[in-house]
Amino acid sequence: MNFLQGIIIYIESVSTKVPLEIFTFFGALTEEVIAPIPSPLVMTLAGSIASSQSKTFLFLLWLALIGAVGKTVGAYVIYLISDKAEDFIVGKIGRFLGVTHNEIEKLGKQLDGSGKDYVFLFLLRFVPIVPTSPISIICGIIKIDLKKYLVTSFTGYYFRNLIYLYLGYVGYGSISQGFDSAESVVKLLLALLIGGVIIYMYFKRSKVDTIGIIKDKFGSKDNH
């Protein structure tokens, strides 16, 4: 049994030992902070338990709200950590990549607060196959406006939670496994994309430095 499997088994065992509302909140928070935990796990499990306890469908609306609060708290923690990590990392290796702290922050400022920006960020949180933790990390790194980040995260999580809760409630939890598999693929693609951008920035900087050295060398000869 690996570490992740141990966490999943522990979450499943706790779900039957505490009130459902408490499990939903802390489970959602943990799921957001510990990225490898399957995104549908807590909500589909909560929906299944709600069904076994003969809760009404309206109760799922309440659980979705609790879960959205938990995931938003977790997303806020990741945002803060990523924000601080960006300050440290760019300060240490930014010069090797040819990027500055201000240039990274400008990326976040490209989202100027229009309605389209809110819709875009909302969809990143709502669409089941989009991994949430990597998005939180990216938002923290480029310092997207915190109010915009929290509002869109909460609303997107709420409706995303409803999907998973309903699947668990009606006994279609296996469908969520398909979402989880698709989400894993998207995580891999995001990792490859980020890695590709870093490599591109490094070689682009190296090329610029080389051209600058050549110009300086031949320029100095021309002056003589």
Image: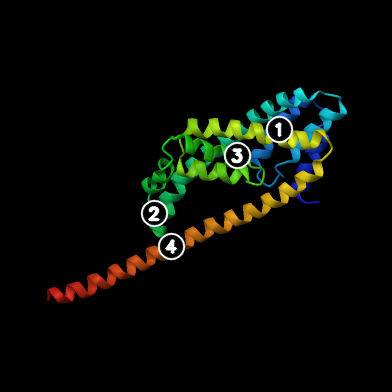
Q: Residue furthest left?
A: 224
- Compute the Cα span from label 4 to label 2: 9 Å
Q: What residue is pinned by disc 2? A: 99
215, above or below 108, in the image: below
Between discs 1 and 2, the one toward the N terminus:
2
- Compute the Cα span from label 1 to label 2: 40 Å
Which residue is located at x 61 percent, y 42 percent? Answer: 132
Q: Nearer the viewer, mark 4 or mark 3?
A: 3
Which residue is located at x 75 percent, y 27 percent? Answer: 60
Question: How many numbered discs, if any?
Answer: 4
Instruction: Specify the quadrant of the image occupied by residue 157.
Output: top right
Between discs 4 and 1, the one toward the N terminus:
1
49, above or below 110, in the image: above
Instruction: Specify the quadrant of the image occupied by residue 71.
Output: top right
Q: What residue is pinned by disc 4? A: 202
Residue type at the position of mark 3: Arg
Residue 204: image x %, image y %?
40, 64
**Disc number placed over residue 125 in the picture, else none:** 3
- Few, some or many residues within 10 Å of mark 1 (<14, 14–19, 20+): many
Residue type at the position of mark 4: Tyr
- Compute the Cα span from label 4 to label 1: 43 Å
- Compute the Cα span from label 4 to label 3: 31 Å
Between discs 4 and 2, the one toward the N terminus:
2
